[in-house]
Image (tube, helix red, strand yellow):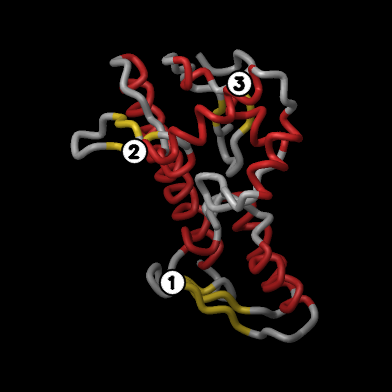
Amino acid sequence: MTGFSEKRPEFQRMINDAKAGRIDTIITKSISRFARNTVTLLRVVREFKDIGVGVLFEENNIYNMSSEGEMMLAVLASFAQEEGRSMSENNKWACRKKFERGELMINTTRFMGYDKDENGNLVINEAEAAIVRRIFDMYLSGIGTHCIAKALNEEGITTVTGSAWHASTIRGMLTNEKYKGDSLLQKYYTPENMRNTVKNNGQVT
């Protein structure tokens, strides 16, 4: 899980184990592996130092129990955080340029009815397309999403990811503009220093 996140389960377990006296020294490869957020890094390392738990950063040759350790950590952690931010901005810039060129970014492993050819162009997957057409036909004939999902599950037909059908899955397909030949880009985005995407209600253009 990304080093920007402080909510990593194993990271929290390590902190709790250290506070409980089950750890006396932590050896990590680098600052960025430990935490890329400078505030989080310094706070946790200081807490460990206060309770006598050493943290050794092998790649940077820094030990938190030494006199110069915290100063070096602050400087290098800032570099690590800025490097992560720069990489994120570069990725966002590349995506925006693709949007401007009208290039689609579609994950066909989660988009039923299509595959990609060797050039990255969408091509119809006839076996999956038959299921898509059936879903739309059923809905247009007056069958509700819950009943459609139930019928597909009873026949042993799975979603594109191999999961069972739910009414929400059917609704997602029926309202997906790509099935009528359109593509609405940047519907979701990832806020800075966050891992999960959120719906774009005009915050990002």
- Percent of width and height locating residue 54: 61, 78
Q: Secondary structure at mark 3?
A: loop
Residue at 62% across / 29% down in the picture? 172
- Percent of width and height locating residue 13: 71, 71
Q: What label does residue 29 carry, if any?
A: 1
Q: Does residue 31 lie above or below 195 as drawn?
A: below
- Percent of width and height locating residue 165: 66, 44
Q: Which quadrant of the rendered structure holds the N terminus?
A: bottom right
Q: CA distance from mark 2 to mark 1?
A: 40 Å
- Asked if the residues shown at circle 3 and circle 2 are in contact, with their CB atoms under 8 angstroms apart, the answer is no
Look at label 1 and name its amino acid: Lys
* Residue closest to the eye, 65 or 198: 198
- Percent of width and height locating residue 166: 70, 41
The first of marks 1 and 3 along the sequence is 1
Q: Does residue 116 lie above or below 49 as drawn?
A: above
Look at label 3 and name its amino acid: Thr
Which residue carries the number 2 mark?
115
Q: What label does residue 175 carry, if any?
A: 3
Mark 3, Cα crowd under 10 Å, few <14 / some 14-19 / many 20+, is few
Residue at 50% across / 27% down in the picture? 133
Mark 2, Cα crowd under 10 Å, few <14 / some 14-19 / many 20+, is some
The first of marks 3 and 2 along the sequence is 2
Classify residue 102 as left or right of residue 75: left
* Residue closest to the eye, 144 or 155: 155
Classify residue 147 as left or right of residue 185: right
Q: Does residue 159 lie above or below 21 as drawn?
A: above
Classify residue 69 as left or right of residue 196: left
Mark 1, Cα crowd under 10 Å, few <14 / some 14-19 / many 20+, is few
